[in-house]
Structures are given as structure tokens and as C-alpha cells.
Amino acid sequence: MEETRILTERDVSLQRLSSVQPLSYEAYCLKGGYVGLSKAMDTLGPSGVRDAVKAAGLRGRGGAGFPTWKKWDMVMQQGEKKRYLCCNAAEDEPGTFKDRYLLRTNPQQLIEGVLIAAFTVGADEAYLFINCRYTEELAFMAEALRVSKTAGHWGLGSASGVVLKVCESPGSYVAGEETALLEVIEGREAKPRQKPPYYPTMHGLYGKPTVVNNAESLSNVPFIVREGAEAFQSFGSPSSPGTMIFTLTGDVNRPGLYERPLGTSLRTLISDCGGGIKDGLVLKAVFPGGPSVPVVPASKADLVLDFDTLKAAGTGLGTGAVIVMSEESCMVQVAIQYARFFANESCGQCPPCSLGTVHLSEILEKIEAGDGRESDITHLEQSCEMVKGRGQCFLLTGAAIAVESILSHFRHEFEAHVTAGGCPLIAQPVH
């Protein structure tokens, strides 16, 4: 394995992603597979594994960057004997395919990570929550589970004693929210629970303490336990150790999935991995972590991709979905595209969300159609500020952040639409 990698053996273009075949159980074991699980159970014990993950500095790869060990420790401190672990591989945000890649390339690695985590927090049941659209990946996982169970790694009577189950996500964005995920597993619609009191670590699946970790977070665990915290910290930056799988899309020559150490700059990812901006055009803007984190202009392309640096710059790492826009991109159209996405993905549970996301879309469409006025730009700005923080999940806030950040950096494009009576750029309309 290359010295810059923990999770994957190679990068893959988006075009070739569907042709990737999973590493076999035998090949995974030859590379040290399931050594970490044995070490966890036979040598370290639950507290030892937690401490190793703490020392490694692993932070959640699902968006927030919360220290993984802290979430585990919260459940470990609960008095309830019955506990659950859920692996979240429901990704359904534009430009994000890292979970799909992990499910395709090495399902055994994810299974081992789930088993180590379940052992650590005292969960005897664990769920793999996988996007229903990933039909081939679901088949790969089913076969990987069959083989690993036959090998004695999980199931009743196995050394771990953990029972693994697969639950298909309905394929909606909101289903990836950790409490909506629990609702689906319990047989209900994907609608987020109110927090508080329903923090999963205290009152999760079936009312029991539950850890919900992202698939990429859990896939890192076998390496940490097997190789040690120092080996993990040899990758990445001091505050954000390890690597991350970045989904690079948009106006680049080589869109694909690239595992790189955290601390890699946006510019390096775009030029070295993506082959630069397509057609020799100039970079205009980048979403460094998907549309639910603020966009950054080209002038900030030297920002490094780690949790704290991006937070200090007013944006975020999100899911590692790096979406690139060239000088020919109309940022009003980009705002419309993402506002429509969030409006379509609202579950309808919270009126501020179902109404607010549609309202943002309508204002943007009015401006794009050439019917906008300066007052509409001001109204858009005010609406974004008004809706942030409302609703039971992050969806409405994410929509507001996407639109507000585009408006903040590219207000002149909105004003140009008003002045010109429509889009002044030669670009394809958003449908």
C-alpha cells in the first residue's frame, strides 16, 4: 500500500467507479485484515481500543469532524446494558461517492471496523445503513458478510458475538441524518427526531444508547488498532490526522475519488489529482465539502483541507465532496441548483424547512429569469439569515448556507442578472 494511503489501494475516476471490484476476504487477510479485531478482543479490550482511537485523533468523516472516541465514550458511560451501533453509508448529497467507493473496494475493511467499534461500545447488534440505490454495492456487502460470518468473525456463537444486519436507506438526503436513520431502521419514515432529548448516544435505536458513525470513520479503525496511533498520526495534519477520500467533481479534467492526507491544499487536489480546470479555463469557486458548507472563491484555493483550517476560513470539510466551478459557471444558476436540491429533499416535517427552501428557490428563479430587482437580492439575503438554525435537522440551514455564501462572494453576478434582465453569461440553464 502506498505510504499516502490507509483506506484504498488506488485512486479511481468517476467514470470507472462502477467497474471497481471488491478485495476478496483472502486478499484482505493477507494485508492484515482482522488482525485488528483479534488485537482488540484479545489484548486491548474496550477501554484500550477507545484510548487508541483517542490517541490517534480520528475525527468523524461524515461532516462534523467530531472526535470518534468521544461518541464511543458517551455510550460506554451509559448504564443501559443493551446498546447498538449503526454504520451510516446513506450518502445522498450532490458530489459525494466516497461511501460507495469504500463499499465497492473493500467491504471487509468496513465490516472489521464495525465489529471493533461494536465490541468497544458493548453493542451486540450493529446495522449497516446503505443507500438503496447502491444495488451492486449491497450485493457485494451481502457476500462479504456471508464470507466473514462463515469465517467466524461475527454472529451468534462467534468470538465477537456481534450480529450484523443491513438496512437499506430510502435514498433520500435527510435519511442520512443520524436520528432519521434510526427512524428508518425502526420501520418508520426518514424524519429527524427532535434533539434534545433524542441524542442517539443516550436515547437512540429502540430507545437504547447508540453510536452512529460514518462508513469512512469506521473503515479507519482497523488500521489504527492494528498499526497503532502513531502510524495513523504520521498522515495528515496535527489537528486532523489521517487521510480522507475526496470526491472531486465539477469543472476538472479528471473527476474522481482521491485518498489524500488531510492538510492537502485545494489547489494541489485540483491540479495534481484533477488535472486542472477543464478546457484550460480559470478557476472561479470551490465547495470544499459539498453544497452544505460555504463556497470559497478562487483566491482561497491555497486553503488546506483539514477540519480546523477550513472552519477558521468560514467554511468546512463536510463529506469531502470538492465541487469545482470554472469562470464560465453562473453562480446564480449554481445557487438555484442547490436550493432546488434542498427543497426537493425536505421531508416536510418542519414547515419552516418545507416552505423556506421553496421560497429561496423561487427568489433565485425570479432573478435568473430576468424578473428580479435589487430588492429581491436583499430579500434573498434576509431570508437566508432568517431560516438558519430552524427545523429539526441541518437541511434548512444547509440550504441557507449554500445560497448565502454564493451571494456573499458573488453578489456582483446577482446584480448583473438584475441589470441585464437575465443571465449575462453564456451558460446552460439549470433544469
Image (spheres, rainbow, N blue to C red):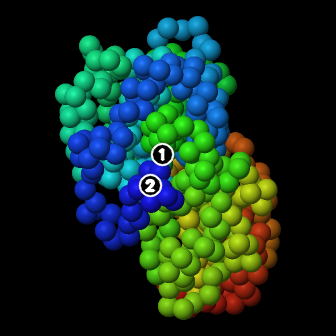
Q: Residue at x 61, y 27 (%)?
A: 51
Disc with the residue nearer the chain's start (1 vs 2): 2
173 left or right, relative to 32: right
In this rendering, the answer to whether 209 lies above or below 430 is above
Q: In which quarter of the view is residue 190 placed?
A: top left
How many neighbours does mark 1 have within 10 angstroms: few (below 14), some (14-19), or many (20 or more)? Answer: many
Q: Amino acid at mark 1?
A: Glu
Kind of element beneath mark 1:
helix
Tag 1–tag 2 contact (CB < 8 Å): yes
Q: Position of residue 54 (x, y in %)?
A: 63, 33
Kind of element beneath mark 2:
helix
269 left or right, relative to 42: right
Q: Position of residue 225 (x, y in %)?
A: 49, 34
Q: Nearer the viewer, residue 147 or 64?
A: 147
Residue annotated with mark 2? 98
Residue 297 numbered mark, or none: none
Residue 216 numbered mark, or none: 1
Q: Nearer the viewer, residue 376 or 342?
A: 342
Q: Position of residue 209 (x, y in %)?
A: 54, 18
Judge whether residue 302 can be spotted in this image: yes
Q: Position of residue 359 (x, y in %)?
A: 63, 58
Q: Amino acid at mark 2?
A: Lys
